[in-house]
Image (tube, rainbow, N blue to C red):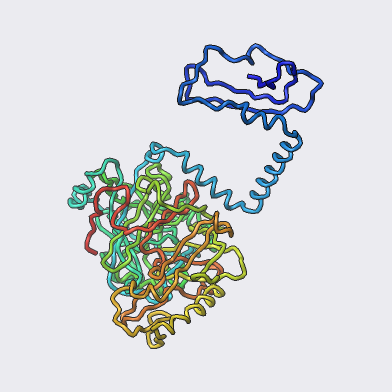
Amino acid sequence: ITQMEPQVDDQRAHAVVIITLPPSDDPSQGKTISAFTLTDHHYPPETHPEDHPNPNFQPGPLHQNPDPGLWLSDLSTGSPRLVLSLIAISLLAIAFYASVFPNTVQMFRVYDERDRDDEANRRETSSFVFPVYHKLGARAIPDRKLAEVVDVVKSGILVESIDQELVNPVKVNDAFSAIAASFDSSTTILPVGGDVYPNGLYFTRILVGKHYFYLDIDTGSDLTWVQCDAPCRSCAKGANQLYTPRKGMLVRSAESLCVEVQKNQMTQHCEDCEQCDYEIEYADLSSSLGVLTKDEFHINLHNGSVADLDIVFGCGYDQQGLLLNTLVKTDGILGLSRAKISLPSQLASRGIISNVIGHCLPSDLNGEGYIIMGSDLVPSHGITWVPMLHHSHLEVYQMQVSKVSYGNGMLSSDGRVGKVLFDTGSSYTYFPNKAYSHLVKSLKEVSGLGLTLDESDKTLPICWRADFVISSLSDFKRFFRPITLQIGSKWWIISKKLVLQPEDHLIISKKGNVCLGILDGSSVHDGSTIILGDVSMRGHLIVYDNVKRRIGWMRSDCVRPRDSDFNVPFFQG
């Protein structure tokens, strides 16, 4: 359709509007409108038969559009140079924004990808939800923090194994199966428990072979391992009996997951060795030495069925350091990192789940939470999403932070962009030295509000004594301000915020004092990264989407996943 000037005697076209109508058999495609201004008045506009309107077309009342001539007349009478100038300025503005705020543009890409996925695509695979429990006993400071495979000790010890008969897992937990069977799709609902203090850890329970084992959940560790009678050289008397490897199930050095585990080790990889040795060293210098083996993990699906999956994991026969204190109440570590050897990555590589995991840690000793593996039970709304950053050599979960503040005061005054790393293996949160020093200085104000420093309380470096009876952390909210991590852009309008309320960085000690659960991280990791530990993740659902490379969080009571209708049946730890 050619829009002409209303004067009949003036045959020169100043502008052209092209309206493309949808096919008659598919009107849902809509119509498109293109507008052009003409600057050459020496050539009359050409007309084509197809340019004339279709007299048989009658738009429905719901699709009527205003006459384009109403707005086009203003455009056609204006200066073409003005229009071109406005277009050029707009393009320059877009280019400038993309160059200055690349991370924000990346955020928009993440959200756009999420919106394009429909519910059918999200439910192609199953999801697993594992329990988190609590056990009595405190973890000594420093806590475990990040882990890394560092070496293989060629001791010449060959691991013994037996031909272990598998148990039929169908009757493992009748109470759980009855609840799980009421769900519509195959997602398992298993609980999580624990606390930051006095227990210092969160753990889940998994049936491996014919026995249950309590595993300390750790998003900063790659390898899942249990204490092993191989025979055991140095093991704590854990919550359950030592695991005995099955005959013929040891992983050989030539297998791909062995190569993956040993790729960063100082000792040269041995392709002809009968077994795959490993040594993991943690940040507190604790370590676990063992071999890789395979066995069936029996995982309950929420439709009542049981998945029996051969999983590669570690048989740890020599544990050293503070790790032994943790193993008095648990049996090993559940590695939940992005590495190929981690449990969720192994499940995702077989197409059993999408590589999405989440955890919801309870806030108190009697609380209950859960771990999600798979995307089915990730809430479709209410979660704040930010891009996941890549680490140079660790398969960890981290995001970018541009500003850190306590109340209205900045803790990162230099304005440098830093990183936040999520680590459930760390009981407490660690700030870089400068941010930590500014925080401690800011907290001096509470001394004039009815709280007094109690240096006799050695629970944590900074503890305050109150002049009133303490019943819960809510009694202290009026003395402390929230800590805000500004994620992504430095401009607050377009950035995302992770707000840590006072109960997200404080604990109550056995003496009844309130203690700061944020520590000096000068010697932790690289010294410049914020390590977000359990104390700051309590009462949140944290989701790590390895498919779309994003991290999300939302407040939650952690009783059950939002999209489920039944309470998670928790076991007694």
List x then y, in percent, for residue 429: 45, 69
Q: Residue lying furthest right in this view? A: 42
Whether residue 83 can be seen here: yes
Quadrant including the C terminus: bottom left
Residue at the spot x=54%, y=25% of the render?
Answer: 31
For the residue pair 19 and 541, the one nearer the viewer reads as 19
Residue at the spot x=40%, y=81% of the render?
Answer: 463
- In the displayed structure, would residue 530 be above or below residue 164? below
List x then y, in percent, for residue 78: 72, 33
Left or right: residue 520 versus residue 1 is: left
- In the displayed structure, would residue 278 be above or below residue 461? above
Whether residue 230 can be seen here: no
For the residue pair 203 and 227, the one nearer the viewer reads as 203
For the residue pair 282 and 184, the one nearer the viewer reads as 184
**To which quarter of the image does residue 4 belong?**
top right
List x then y, in percent, for residue 303: 25, 43
List x then y, in percent, for residue 238: 29, 68
